[in-house]
Image (cartoon, helix red, strand yellow):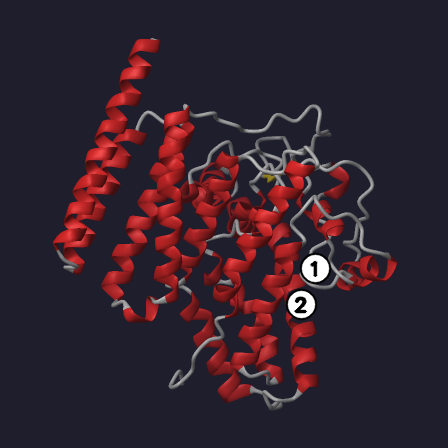
Amino acid sequence: MFENFTPPPIVTYAIPAFFLLIGIEVYIGYRKNKALYRLNDSIADLSTGIISQIWGLFQKGIGLFAYFYIYEHFRFFEFALTNPWAWILCIVGQDFCYYWSHRLAHEVNILWAGHVIHHHSEEYNLVVALRQTGLGGIVSWIFYVPLALIGFHPWMYLASGQINLIYQFWVHTKAVGKIGKIGEYLFSTPSHHRVHHAINPIYIDKNHGGIFIIFDRMFGTFQEETEPCVYGTVKPLRSFNPVYANIHYYWELIKQAATAPYFLDKIKVFFKPPGWYPREGKNPAGFLPIPEVSPESFHKYDPKPQPEVRTYTTTWFVLVLLLSFAFLLFVAKFSFISQVLVTLWVTLSLVAINALIEGKSWAGAMEITRLLFGFLVIAYFDVGWAYYVIGIVCLLVAGIYLYRTNGQKAQAA
């Protein structure tokens, strides 16, 4: 079924363009004297983006296999890859399926658990577009089954999905205003998507379209941007830990189901909208109120590490980012065990880096652990003595850094 099939690498090759546009947005903010970025928040966003791509390597096969199987055995029609009308229909159809996938991810708790991570950031910039779930690939493919039944080739389906994803990148910005009546009426724009990410009560669960906004207009979920947006989630995460960000809502649902006194409510917890709470005694089930917010009253989560910590974590984050990008480019050359080892090391590294930024008490131990594990990974790959030297140097630098920062804390105390 998968013989001689190579997925389109459009998103991978678009990554340098993403970072170029991020640089332009940073420059625009600097020129206009507007703080569009915070380093700690951006590292947290990119950490979840890296994990999304690397964890996704172990999930994409599920949806791809299902799509292939349905396409091969149950398709109604067959469209040539060279047919331009088929491409247009597939792109529109993909966005229609995305609209419902995205809308239900806001209206069904168990689906929101996999999507909430994209909304955790309390900033709104191009880096937020890269903040994605590491677990969404397990079920999201179900919404695209109609495309396989219609008969859109798997390569066309994957390419259209990547085009949709790339389009959505540019709408995550405050640097662009409205783009004109026709554009605002037909397409998802930065203004429309700012509404989608806002936690103002008037904006909750609006504007779900990826490329087009017409489906929101058709199905009653459109909202114009009419008041200043406040970003994040109604219940703030207050953490930069990328693993916790991926799993915390699943755990909250499990705890809520476990404590619900009625069996039916234990099931409802997973399928009701976010904010729903079960019956308790004589108190009926209901929804938590959505508080009014404003940019002036909202307090962002903003831990401020020491300059030495900021330099150390930023340097290591850039290294992990570059290594992850190289790994994704050449992942086909890695064995399954090698992929697992690299994934574990990258995950440990991102947890440790963000813990250091947040000043967690266990951050130093985690940092040493992930460096030691990295040394073992180098040994597994048997890449030569030079890399062992590099590994030892990294451990020494980390030890000196932790000794100095702990000494400074002790003096401050």
Placement of 108 over or under 338, stated as above or below:
above
> Circle 1 is placed at which residue position?
209
- Badge 2 marks a residue whose secondary structure is helix
Q: Position of residue 310 (x, y in %)?
A: 41, 31
Asked if labels 2 and 1 touch by Cβ distance under 8 angstroms, the answer is yes
The quarter in which the C terminus is drawn is: top left
Placement of 356 over or under 246, stated as above or below:
above
- Extreme-left residue of the structure: 385
Q: Is residue 331 left or right of residue 248?
A: left
Q: Residue at x 66, y 74 (%)?
A: 91
> Circle 2 is placed at which residue position?
95
Q: Nearer the viewer, residue 60 or 280?
A: 60
- Mark-to-mark CA distance, 1 and 2: 7 Å
Q: Is residue 366 left or right of residue 91?
A: left
Can residue 273 be seen? no
Q: Residue at x 80, y 56 (%)?
A: 220
Q: Nearer the viewer, residue 101 or 320?
A: 320
